[in-house]
Image (tube, grey):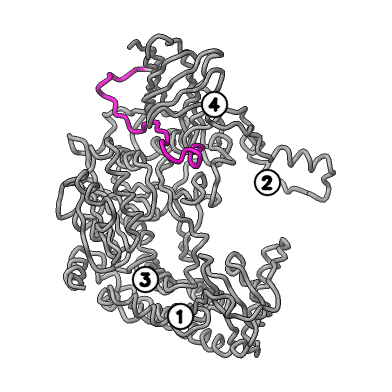
């Protein structure tokens, strides 16, 4: 095999490079996921904002725009991509190989295959990256680099004339101009009459920049906690078992089964367990929620003292195994021990990225998207290359535990997860780590497919209790002096669920505040029985009574239809205030209705506007399997708001004492968790 090499600056010898990003392709579900890996090349179309950021300071005056101007705007915003199927452009030969058909052109500036150079520049000491690939046929391989603004330019073009035998092409690129972000990638174009095969493409970094102290390759343990999602969890195990590269770095998978539908009873589990051998540790324990399952995996990893990292994975996610390796290899090079998170792609719409890391607002004590990057970005409609804002480096405060790599050294220093069952455990962990000087980086090219949140509404389930309780436990642990905004947030939540006639959520929210004030020992001792108590507290409310037989219900007087007229923030606040006053003062009693006022779809049920002037409503559940006949009860609402005000006022008054109690208790310590595991071992 011959070699063609283009170099920039002083090259490092062959044995001093380590591959950290392999270019991979999907071998299953290609029609659902391919835009995340490779796309047909099209002519770039960058927006004015990339070249002149001042354009965002100008207001668009649509009233002064004529028809021709409006049509031009629509043409520019329309997706210019041709409808050519990818199988007409290229073929995936294997996990590491693709063939570009004659006269066709592909781009690897994609979520999974562009190298996140800006992140490596910021968080590691790497100063140069080397690209290598095996090629056969005729054509060109062009390397590109972008900046944090999304501007990109070619680095070099490697001409390929290797019709007879495969050849290796390589080039190294200096890590310059990347402070604000940027990617490296390659495009490949086949000759006019000859296809071009590109195999084993990869990005490597100098080993001298490695900060992991181990002389041998680092290893990880994977923790998957599951509760009655046995088929999904088994699929995760099979995916990991089939990836040879990942298993070379794997100590064991801690499969923490907390359910009654057991993973070990799945068809084929014995074969999977036999294939994994000692790389699978199957554990049964009481249902301690996500925090209990993940803490068990952290705890066992600490005891075993063989792994450098713990990779947390959701049971009902689909993994890209290469992403797990990338997270670990990035962590090997960070200047300080770093939590490396992965993004969440939609399980039911595979090319849509829900989020790539989030920020935490210490004013509202709630989380949100990072640097105004919108949730739910579709890379099929807006590829990475043509989405300049996605080239900017995004610094995050925490990462969801659907996929999160934590160095064992951090766990050893700051402890395990809080014993809070579910919700806010992942957020609190990163806040705690940051206070000890350890950052969380959500690395592009690292992600899992997970069920999105659009078919969930915590306010309509027992989860509302844990959201409310754990949010303010987290604040007690990490906030300074409480502000009046904290009280506003507590009351705003009460007002919001009450406007939507979810009175069971009011009970759970107040139950959460009362339990916080009972102290940290109560929170710890309530594991795992609290869930049953919370479920019991929801019973008996109209909004918590699911009805599956629609024929047993009278027809609603009308169907709700949202007339969504755009409004200013001031007008929305004014309308909201008016709706609250109206609901509080209302004497309407829907508990005696013999017929619902309206029917409200699950999509519209999240909006308080849908319930204005409604006496009672048939509301579809988020999963679409049932409805609840919610009934207005003004007397109950007013009583609940008074109780919420009393509890929030009391909590803020006792804040300093409570904060001191929670901070000195050390809830996340190994000792506390050992006591929980011991106490619940027979449950």
How busy is the neighbourhood of tag 1: few (under 14 within 10 Å), some, or many (20 plus)?
Answer: many
Residue range (magenta): 10-36
How busy is the neighbourhood of tag 4: few (under 14 within 10 Å), some, or many (20 plus)?
Answer: some
Say whether disc 1 or disc 4 marks the residue closer to the N-terminus: 4
Q: CA distance from mark 2 to mark 3?
A: 40 Å
Pair 4/3: label in front = 4
Instruction: Tell me the tag on residue 57.
Output: 2
> Tag 2's secondary structure?
helix
Which residue is drawn at the image coordinates 63% and 87% (left, top)?
A: 593
Q: Which residue is mark 3?
A: 473
> Tag 1's secondary structure?
helix
Disc 4 to disc 3: CB gap under 8 Å: no
Residue 70 visible in the current orientation:
yes
Q: Which residue is mark 4?
A: 89
Q: Residue 500 in the image: x percent, y percent?
A: 58, 76
Instruction: Tell me the tag on residue 648.
Output: 1
Q: Residue 107 in the image: x percent, y percent?
A: 52, 28
Disc 4 to disc 2: CB gap under 8 Å: no
Q: CA distance from mark 1 to mark 4?
A: 61 Å
On whether residue 29 falls in the magenta region, the answer is yes
| Figure check: 438 above or below 113 | below
Choose between 598 and 525: the one closer to the eye: 598
| Figure check: 190 above or below 462 | above
How busy is the neighbourhood of tag 3: few (under 14 within 10 Å), some, or many (20 plus)?
Answer: many
Q: Quadrant of residue 532?
A: bottom left
> Tag 4's secondary structure?
loop
On whether residue 131 falls in the magenta region, the answer is no
Choose between 333 and 533: the one closer to the eye: 533
Say whether disc 2 or disc 3 marks the residue closer to the N-terminus: 2
Q: Residue 198 in the image: x percent, y percent?
A: 42, 22
Say whether disc 4 or disc 2 marks the residue closer to the N-terminus: 2
Which residue is drawn at the image coordinates 57% and 80% (left, top)?
A: 552
């Amino acid at each position: 095999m011959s070699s063609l090499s283009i170099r920039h600056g002083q090259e490092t010898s062959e044995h001093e490079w380590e591959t950290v990003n392999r270019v991979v392709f999907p071998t299953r579900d290609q029609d659902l996921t391919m835009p995340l890996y490779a796309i047909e090349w099209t002519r770039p179309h960058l927006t004015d904002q990339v070249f002149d950021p001042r354009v965002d300071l100008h207001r668009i005056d649509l009233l002064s725009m004529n028809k021709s101007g409006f049509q031009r705007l629509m043409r520019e915003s329309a997706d210019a991509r041709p409808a050519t199927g990818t199988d007409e452009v290229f073929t995936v030969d294997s996990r590491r190989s693709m063939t570009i058909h004659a006269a066709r052109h592909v781009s690897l500036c994609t979520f999974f295959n562009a190298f996140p150079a800006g992140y490596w520049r910021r968080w590691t000491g790497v100063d140069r990256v080397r690209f290598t690939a095996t090629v056969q046929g005729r054509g060109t391989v062009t390397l590109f680099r972008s900046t944090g603004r999304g501007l990109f330019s070619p680095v070099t073009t490697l001409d390929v004339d290797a019709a007879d035998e495969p050849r290796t092409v390589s080039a190294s690129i200096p890590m310059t101009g990347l402070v604000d972000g940027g990617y490296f990638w390659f495009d490949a174009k086949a000759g006019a009459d000859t296809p071009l095969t590109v195999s084993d493409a990869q990005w490597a970094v100098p080993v001298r920049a490695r900060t992991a102290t181990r002389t041998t390759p680092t290893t990880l343990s994977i923790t998957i906690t599951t509760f009655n999602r046995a088929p999904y969890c088994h699929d995760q195990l099979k995916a990991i078992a089939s990836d040879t590269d990942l298993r070379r770095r794997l100590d064991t998978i801690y499969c923490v089964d907390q359910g009654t539908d057991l993973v070990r009873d799945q068809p084929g589990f014995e074969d999977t367990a036999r294939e994994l051998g000692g790389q699978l540790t199957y554990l049964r324990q009481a249902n301690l929620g996500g925090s209990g399952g993940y803490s068990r995996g952290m705890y066992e990893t600490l005891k075993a003292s063989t792994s450098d990292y713990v990779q947390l994975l959701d049971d009902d996610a689909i993994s890209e195994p290469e992403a797990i390796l990338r997270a670990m290899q990035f962590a090997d090079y960070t200047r300080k021990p770093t939590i490396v998170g992965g993004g969440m792609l939609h399980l039911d719409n595979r090319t849509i990225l829900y989020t790539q890391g989030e920020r935490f607002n210490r004013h509202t004590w709630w989380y949100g998207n990072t640097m105004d990057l919108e949730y739910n970005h579709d890379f099929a409609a807006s590829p990475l290359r043509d989405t300049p804002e996605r080239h900017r480096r995004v610094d995050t405060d925490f990462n969801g535990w659907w996929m999160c790599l934590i160095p064992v050294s951090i766990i050893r220093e700051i402890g395990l997860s809080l014993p809070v069952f579910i919700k806010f455990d992942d957020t609190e962990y990163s806040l705690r780590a940051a206070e000890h000087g350890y950052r969380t980086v959500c690395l592009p090219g690292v992600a899992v497919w997970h069920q999105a949140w659009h078919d969930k509404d915590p306010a309509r389930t027992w989860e509302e209790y844990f959201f409310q309780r754990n949010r303010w436990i987290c604040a007690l642990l990490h906030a300074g002096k409480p502000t009046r905004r904290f009280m506003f947030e507590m009351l705003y939540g009460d007002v919001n669920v009450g406007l939507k006639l979810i009175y069971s959520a009011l009970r759970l929210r107040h139950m959460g505040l009362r339990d916080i004030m009972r102290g940290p020992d109560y929170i710890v001792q309530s594991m795992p029985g609290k869930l049953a108590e919370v479920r019991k507290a929801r019973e008996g409310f109209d909004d918590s009574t699911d009805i599956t037989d629609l024929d047993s219900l009278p027809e609603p007087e009308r169907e709700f239809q949202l007339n969504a007229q755009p409004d200013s923030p001031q007008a929305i606040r004014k309308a909201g205030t008016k709706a609250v006053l109206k609901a509080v003062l209302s004497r309407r009693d829907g508990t005696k209705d013999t017929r619902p006022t309206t029917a409200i779809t699950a999509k519209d049920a999240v909006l308080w506007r849908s319930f204005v002037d409604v006496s009672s409503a048939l509301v579809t559940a988020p999963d679409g399997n049932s409805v609840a006949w919610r009934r207005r009860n003004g007397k109950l609402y007013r009583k609940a708001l008074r109780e919420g005000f009393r509890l929030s006022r009391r909590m803020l008054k006792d804040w300093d004492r409570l904060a001191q109690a929670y901070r000195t208790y050390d809830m996340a310590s190994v000792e506390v968790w050992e006591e929980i595991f011991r106490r619940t071992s027979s449950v």
